[in-house]
Amino acid sequence: MTPPDPTAESAAGPAADPMAELAPDPALERWRLVLGSPAEPWTGRPSADGAARDAALEWLYGRDQDLDRRGVRSAGLEPSRVTAVDWLDDIHRLFPRETIERLERDAVEQYGIDEIVTDPTVLERVEPSPALLRAVLRTKHLMNDQLLGQARRIVAAVVRQLMERLTPELRQAFTGARSARPSRRPLARDFDFRRTVRANLGRYRPAERRILIERPHFHSRTRRHLEQWQLILLVDQSGSMVGSVIHSAVTAACLWNLPGLKTHLVAFDTQVVDLTSDVTDPVELLMRVQLGGGTDIARAVDYAAGLVENPRRTILAVISDFYEGGDRYRLLRTVRSLTGQGATVLGLAALDEEAAPAYDRELAGLLADAGAHVGAMTPGMLAEFVAERLGR
């Protein structure tokens, strides 16, 4: 038998690449997407879908200047002609929703691809998300009336999502406390474990190590008698506080008209804008917010002090990064006066779902020395704090 000629081509054409004949391993393909083309000798080439995903990731993360320093940028590549619209279409086809939201967030916040929120064609396709809401609030001053109308869709969708998620949590903090009186309403949240066990101890079965429950017992609930309190949310609208601005607006809307609580929402930079009249429409409220500018916390706190009706029934939450551009001594003097009269002053470096603050620690420390409670809170934590004060 004559051995085959290694230089001869098969009837089907040139010899196939052995790597191309093997189906990509899903785990290796994920590593290939993470590590990029330099990893191909170890991971193998990606599938057709994997190559498309890789191209979409490269369009975004190939902008990273750190790639040059690390020497991993692919050489000889021409600038991509893919538009933001094409890229959005691709990622919505290739990736799951959670990944899409991350990619859109990085595009806007990390790489400043503003056309995602300033191009009407893109706005029609983009998936509403908190990251895009932040981007809209940062760039809406660049938009014409048509763009503002489309941007409002994003604002409304994300606010609705936040309201649906936060309203039950915030209002739950203000529901009546359980009392020792029994109830005939069999609600799981009111199950009285101790009373049920005591009442059924005679039915304990040692061999089975269990109690047979003939009749469960439940607590009743009583609503607290609430005296009128004021909650004044004073929120810094500088660009770094955009997440807190959004959550302050939603928090104020969720707490509006709760019994025993009068809520105010005031935004500030170097000027002070009382937004309380728009609290019931957080979409319109956020479209009115003007991010950026300087920061005059002292002026804003002076305005808030003028709203106080009964200091001992007032909670003033100053939501800011505390980089004061105004008179810090005037600020400290006003805070010391408010706390001296019995008002509760909160200095919140963040009010959002992550509660991850970045702030001027020196001024925050001075505010704490003046009697303020300084920290960061989620909206739920703030609601619990307010409810605790109202229940006293």
Image: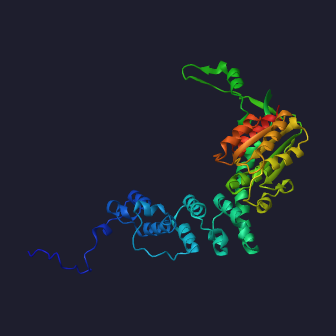
Above or below, 324 relative to 45: above
Q: Is residue 266 left or right of residue 193?
A: right
User: Do we see residue 236 in this rendering?
Assistant: yes
| In the image: residue 160, left or right of residue 2 | right
Q: Give the residue displayed 72% in from the left and 45% down from the top.
A: 379
x and y, in percent, of residue 293 in the image: 74, 59
- Depicted 46 relative to depicted 340: above or below: below
Q: Nearer the viewer, residue 328 or 148?
A: 328
The residue most toward the right is 309
Which quadrant holds residue 366? top right
Residue 282 left/right relative to 310: left
- Please report the residue visible at 82 percent of the width from the left and 52 percent of the height from the top: 266
Q: Which quarter shows the C terminus?
A: top right
Residue 27, percent from left and from top: 40, 56
Quadrant in the rendering for residue 86: bottom right
Look at the image and tell me whether residue 274 can be seen.
Answer: no
- Image spot of residue 339 (x, y percent): 82, 35
Q: How is the image coloured?
A: rainbow
Q: Is residue 6 left or right of residue 285?
A: left
Pinpoint residue 4: horizontal percent, then vertical percent.
14, 75
Quadrant placement of the N terminus? bottom left
Q: Residue at x 74, y 56 (%)?
A: 294
**Total marks drawn?**
0
Pick the front one: 179 or 304: 304
Q: Is residue 282 above or below residue 21?
A: above
